[in-house]
């Protein structure tokens, strides 16, 4: 009886997960010229390119210090060391954990979209939680499967765990164990808030979870964060520990949750958003009504990264569920497309009849070697030109004369720089190391040769001023509690966007006395400030249930409310989560870790057997779904699977009848 149950579980879950392409993942390889080191840590084997020792030590420090705390509310420590691979050549910021073969892969270039949390800490907290989630469920009914099919068993064990739980619980962890985390950002929940308070439509749990081709439904990261965090707040910090423990004995995730709460998943969704609606209603004061300049669209459509061409014409990036990103002009409420554009990762800059931005471009050969390049759209001839091929440039800002562009450059070795380029041809003029090796996520020019940078480092987020003439840096403002983004200089003052009052709004920094003032009162979110050519109107992207709209406020409509960025309005669940964990990676005194790197010889690690099976199937066919049914896919026989740590050699060997 028990044997039959195991075989039924194995055949159903294994091949269903294969068809989802979730179990076997080739994350891509790095340039062949890279030479590698390995560090044997107490709980991890850290593999990284030579020349990145400083970066690798930071990851080692955070991985080991966070280890006992990340597992606190999920349980089950690791029994074997977990491989971790750093990929510094990839400009796309991401990370993943896979179990066939088991490893954590981290793309170390910081993200410009993240809040006030350093990227390495964010990755460590989020991805480490995924290790413990999957490791936790490799017990009970699933434990014997490892001996039968190897590391494929982790895919079977995780099959019935919903994605919203896995990702939401990881976001809860990154938020609870640091000063940052996406749960602290009001914009993370802005889609739900606008839908609940600003729209007559009420979406079901299935629609929020599975998405829609018609309506924008956010991501399961935010949905899962809200539901997992509400459950912890209502039922205790160990609710997901108890739920996953019971799941390993009955295969019923929803049933296990109901066993300890009396509530099903649908009821958890309803309770969560009933609670959030009440909390958000408290913040839902009367907004200052702007004038909208972009078209009022029927379906979800956004106009962002606004630039002003003249008194009657605006330039923006339009995006929707039906179209890819495009440059458009907006005049008298009507739009005209200029050009489709690629994978943009910055705002727009308008200078001398040309529009500038940076976007990701793939490398010619290696998955983990790609670029972020400066591009130009010439409005006279409609042509797009790449000014800086094969570079790592982010966050461009152009000076008043239209002769110099400043960019952020995170180098492969982890060094962060501010670089000045000639705008005409993209040639480098000068480069400046950032204090404390902080990451520059956005830039703007002030008067003369002064550049202002939004910088994230271990102390939080700061506004730094650089005098490019002599290379002198000066701190204008710093905070560890509220996000700062979209800086812009106007008439001797610095404007930026922050969620300090619980809603994203536009703020102003008076450099004379270092005081900060809130100038907008948006209902759901105000972003990306800019001023009219005459300087008498503030224009910005105003978020509504149907997307971002271009909004305008007259000077007399602006507020002048002094704000303390170190005392922001807390978002729901944050205080509860932090109190439950009782540990903060940003505030803790970190213990040093043994760090003795040795050369990692690729040739000696060509093969790494991770899974096997007492039958045969073609993994490639299973992933592509080429087989008509299970009977044609699975054959009598045996097989083994190998994939090395650096993803340079994948092998399947076996016999079938």
Image (tube, helix red, strand yellow):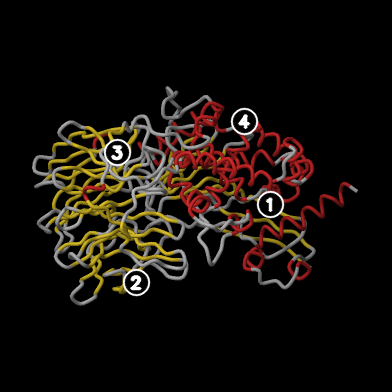
Residue pointed to by mark 4: 237
Residue pointed to by mark 3: 438
Q: Secondary structure at mark 2?
A: strand
Q: CA distance from mark 2 to mark 4?
A: 48 Å
As drawn, 497 above or below 242: below
**As drawn, is 178 to the left or to the right of 607?**
left
Q: Quadrant of residue 24?
A: bottom right
Residue pointed to by mark 2: 340
As drawn, 398 above or below 47: below
Q: Earlier in the sequence, mark 4 or mark 3?
A: 4
User: What percent of the width, then of the height, locates residue 606?
Assistant: 53, 53
User: What percent of the width, then of the height, locates residue 450?
Assistant: 13, 44
Residue pointed to by mark 1: 159
User: What percent of the width, then of the height, locates residue 142?
Assistant: 75, 44
Q: Secondary structure at mark 1?
A: loop
Q: Is residue 540 visible?
A: yes
């Amino acid at each position: 009886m028990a044997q039959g149950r195991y075989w039924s579980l194995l055949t159903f879950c294994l091949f269903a997960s294969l068809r989802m392409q979730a179990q076997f993942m080739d994350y891509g390889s790095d340039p062949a010229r890279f030479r590698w080191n390995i560090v044997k840590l107490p709980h991890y084997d850290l593999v990284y390119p030579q020349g990145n020792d400083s970066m690798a030590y930071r990851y080692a420090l955070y991985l080991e210090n966070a280890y006992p705390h990340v597992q606190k509310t999920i349980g089950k420590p690791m029994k074997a060391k977990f491989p971790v691979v750093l990929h510094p050549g990839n400009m796309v910021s991401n990370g993943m954990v896979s179990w066939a073969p088991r490893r954590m892969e981290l793309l170390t270039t910081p993200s410009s979209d993240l809040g006030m949390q350093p990227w390495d800490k964010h990755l460590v907290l989020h991805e480490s939680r995924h290790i413990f989630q999957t490791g936790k469920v490799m017990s009970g009914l699933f434990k014997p499967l490892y001996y039968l099919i190897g590391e494929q068993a982790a895919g079977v064990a995780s099959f019935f765990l919903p994605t919203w739980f896995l990702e939401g619980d990881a976001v809860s962890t990154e938020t609870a164990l640091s000063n940052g985390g996406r749960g602290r950002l009001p914009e993370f929940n802005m889609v739900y808030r606008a839908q609940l308070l600003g729209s007559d439509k009420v979406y079901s749990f299935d629609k929020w979870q599975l998405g829609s081709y018609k309506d924008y439904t956010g991501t399961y990261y935010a949905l899962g964060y809200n539901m997992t965090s509400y459950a912890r707040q209502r039922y205790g910090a160990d609710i997901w520990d108890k739920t996953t423990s019971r799941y390993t004995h009955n295969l019923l995730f929803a049933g296990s949750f109901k066993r300890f709460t009396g509530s099903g998943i649908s009821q958890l969704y309803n309770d969560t958003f009933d609670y959030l609606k009440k909390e958000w209603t408290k913040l839902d004061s009367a907004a200052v009504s702007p004038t909208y300049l972009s078209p009022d669209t029927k379906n979800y459509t956004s106009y962002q990264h606004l630039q002003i061409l003249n008194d009657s014409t605006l330039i923006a990036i339009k995006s929707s569920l039906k179209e890819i990103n495009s440059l458009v002009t907006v005049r008298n409420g009507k739009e005209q497309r200029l050009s489709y554009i690629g994978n943009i990762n910055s705002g727009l800059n308008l200078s001398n009849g040309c529009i500038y931005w940076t976007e990701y471009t793939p490398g010619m050969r290696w998955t983990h070697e790609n670029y972020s390049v400066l591009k130009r759209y010439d409005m006279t001839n409609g042509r797009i030109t790449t000014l800086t091929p094969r570079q790592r440039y982010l966050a461009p800002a152009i000076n008043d004369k239209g002769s110099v562009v400043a960019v952020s450059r995170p180098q492969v070795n982890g060094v962060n720089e501010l670089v000045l380029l000639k705008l005409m041809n993209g040639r480098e003029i000068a480069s400046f190391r950032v204090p404390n090796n902080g990451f520059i996520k956005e830039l703007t020019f002030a008067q003369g040769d002064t550049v202002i940078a939004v910088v994230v480092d271990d102390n939080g987020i700061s506004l730094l001023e650089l005098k490019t003439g002599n290379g002198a840096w000066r701190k204008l403002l710093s905070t560890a509690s509220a996000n700062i983004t979209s800086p812009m200089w106007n008439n001797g003052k610095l404007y930026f966007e922050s969620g300090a009052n619980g809603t994203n709004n536009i703020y102003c920094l008076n450099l004379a006395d270092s005081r900060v003032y809130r100038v907008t009162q948006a209902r759901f979110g105000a972003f990306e400030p800019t001023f009219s050519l005459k300087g008498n109107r503030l224009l910005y992207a105003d978020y509504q249930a149907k997307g971002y709209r271009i909004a305008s406020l007259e000077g007399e409509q602006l507020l002048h409310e002094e704000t303390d960025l170190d005392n922001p309005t807390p978002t729901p669940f944050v205080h509860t989560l932090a109190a439950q964990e009782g540990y903060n990676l940003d505030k803790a005194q970190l213990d040093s870790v043994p760090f003795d790197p040795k050369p990692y010889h690729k040739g000696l690690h060509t093969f790494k057997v991770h899974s096997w099976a007492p039958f045969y199937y073609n993994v490639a066919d299973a992933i592509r779904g080429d087989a008509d049914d299970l009977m044609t896919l699975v054959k009598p026989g045996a097989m083994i699977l190998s994939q090395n740590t650096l993803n340079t050699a994948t092998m399947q060997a076996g016999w079938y009848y």
